[in-house]
Amino acid sequence: MVFVIGDDVEPFLNLDQPTGSAQIRESARMRGRVEVQITQTFTVPRDVVLKAPTRFYLGRARAATAAFVRAGGTRRVRAGRFRARVTVRVPAAYRGRFSYAACFRATRGSGLGDPKATCPTRRFRF
C-alpha cells in the first residue's frame, strides 16, 4: 500500500489501499526552510505486530517518479498503533514544492495488504 501527497498536501490512497480494520494516516510538516518531516501512522488490531521498515520517496511536484530517500523504522506507539517517521532535506531545486510517497511492506497477518507485494528499491512511480 502506498500513500502519496501532492502539492496541495491532500493525501489520497492508491488502489492498493488496505481493507478491513487497518487504517493508515500520513502527514508531512516542514522543519525549517529545507527539511520536511514525514510521518506514517498505522492503526491495526491490538494483537498485530508490524516489524518491516517504511520506505520514503521524494520527488519534484507533479513529477512522474520520486527517488528513494530513506527507510524509517516502524515503532510501536501503543497496542494497535505504530509509527514510522523520517526527516529529509528538500533539494533547493524543488523550490519548496514536492511530492512524496511512503511504502510499507505488509507483514503476514497484519491486514495491511498482500505480504508478497514489494516496495520499489530506487524510484517510485506515481
Image (cartoon, rainbow, N blue to C red):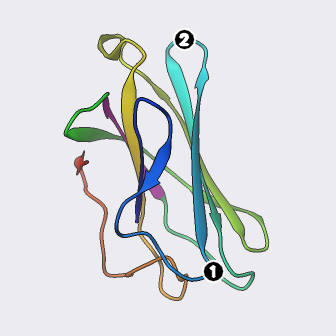
> Is 36 placed above or below 85 here?
above
Q: Describe the element under mark 1 as helix, strand or loop.
A: loop
Q: Describe the element under mark 2 as helix, strand or loop.
A: loop
Residue named by callout 2 = 33
Could you classify mark 1 by the number of other residues whose Cα lies within 10 Å: few (under 14), some (14-19), or many (20 or more)? few
Report the span colored magenta: 54-60
Residue 64's label in the rendered image is none
Q: Is residue 56 visible?
A: no
Residue named by callout 1 = 21
Q: Position of residue 10 (x, y in %)?
A: 50, 40
Does the magenta segment cover residue 21? Answer: no
Q: Position of residue 110 (x, y in %)?
A: 55, 82
Q: Amino acid at mark 1?
A: Ser
The structure residue drawn at horizontal position 39% and vertical position 81%, both measured from the top left corner, is 115
- The Cα atoms of the two marked residues, 1 and 2, are separated by 37 Å
The structure residue drawn at horizontal position 65% and vertical position 56%, both measured from the top left corner, is 83
Name the foreground residue: 97 vs 51.
97
- Number of numbered discs on residues: 2
The structure residue drawn at horizontal position 50% and vertical position 79%, both measured from the top left corner, is 19
Name the foreground residue: 104 vs 16.
16
